Every structure is written in C-alpha cells, then in structure tokens.
Amino acid sequence: MKVLVIAASKHGATREIGAAIAEELAGAGVEAEQAEPGEVASLEGYDAVVLGSAVYMTQWMENARNFMAHHGQELRSLPLWAFSVGLSGVPVGAVQDPRRIGPHLLAINPIDHQTFKGRLELANLSLRERSIARLGNAPEGDFREWDKIRDWARQIASDLAEHLPAD
Ligand SMILES: Cc1cc2nc3c(=O)[nH]c(=O)nc-3n(C[C@H](O)[C@H](O)[C@H](O)COP(=O)(O)O)c2cc1C
C-alpha cells in the first residue's frame, strides 16, 4: 500500500506539515512518499493521495489548483484526503477563512478535508506579502498544532483499508 503526500507550500510551513503526515503514515506501517505538486507527473502506482496547500489570498496555491485541474480524473479514482493550511485566529466564515476553500475541493471530492493553522513570519515574507499581512492584522508566529496534524495522519492510516478496492 503506497500513499503520496503532496503539499503546496511557499514558505515551508505546509511542506513540513506534509512531512509530518508522511512520517506518521510510515510509522503506522504505510509506505508514504512526499512531493510538491510540480514534481508529480502521474499518480500511477499509488493507492491513495493526501493533497494539501497553504492558503494565500483565500485560495489554494496556484500549483495545487493546477494539479487538481490536470489530475482531477486520477484524483477522483483514488481515495483522497485534503488539507488546507492558513492563518491562526481567522473568524469562521470570514473571507480569509481557510475552510472556505471547501467548495473548490468539491471537484475532487476528498474523503475528508482538514484545516490546520500555519506559520506567519514577517521577516521571511516579500515586501508585498508583508504589507498584506500587516493590513489584515495577521498574528505572527508558528501556530501549527502538531498533535492534531499527527492524529489526523494516524486516522488516515487506520481508515485506508476500508477505502481500498477489494481484491
Ligand atoms: C500574503 C499572505 C496572504 C495570506 N492569505 C491567507 C488567507 O487568505 N487565509 C488564510 O487562512 N491564511 C492566509 N495566509 C497565511 C498563510 O496561509 C500561512 O502563513 C501559511 O502557514 C503559509 O504556509 P507556507 O509557509 O507553507 O507557505 C496568508 C499569508 C500571507 C503572507
């Protein structure tokens, strides 16, 4: 059983979440690989996919959206879990709320979609990004909830079998 964890990340926080998910899957006895969307030419040979992206300006990153567009058919044919990584403390339903990404995921119909808090470090941002973050009063810091992330990965590992085609 082989799972591909695909994480779209600009400043590294989501990539590290993808790595933790892959590590947790491996710890649960599932063969897991990690990649960026641009590195994946085909999903052949994988039994399931975990696909996630950082949220910027209310949307998944462009490489993740392109990946969904180009691999939609393959994604719909495999058990799929999705996650979005966004700001901490955004009120539910506000325009920047990463949960609002949900409707975009309907086209690929994941078994589950989770939202995780990410990391915002102004010093690592471009001037433009920094002014957007300041305008939005975004809280600075690393808000990633590793226990929640790792619990979710373990849940995927234990749910996998029921979503695989019977031999
Ligand atoms: C310019 C900018 C815009 C952002 N827009 C959103 C947003 O609309 N919703 C949200 O939840 N988080 C938003 N964020 C927060 C990022 O999603 C968060 O910092 C995330 O951890 C970045 O992940 P990465 O390090 O993998 O790129 C934004 C951050 C920046 C710098």
Image (cartoon, helix red, strand yellow):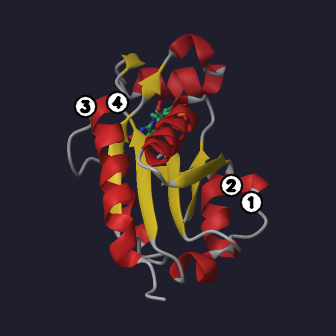
Q: Quadrant of residue 72?
A: bottom right
Amino acid carrying label 3: it is Gly
Seen at 57% across and 51% down, the residue is: 32
SS label for mark 2: helix
First in sequence, mark 4 or 3: give its number: 3
First in sequence, mark 4 or 1: give its number: 1
SS label for mark 1: loop
Q: Is residue 146 visible?
A: yes
Q: CA distance from mark 4 to mark 2?
A: 23 Å
Q: Identify residue for label 1.
A: 40
Q: Residue furthest bottom?
A: 167
Q: Identify residue for label 4.
A: 146
Q: CA distance from mark 3 to mark 1?
A: 33 Å
x and y percentages locating residue 130 in the rendered image: 55, 21
- Going by the image, does 127 lie left or right of 23? right
Tell which tag, 4 or 2, sits nearer the viewer.
Answer: 4
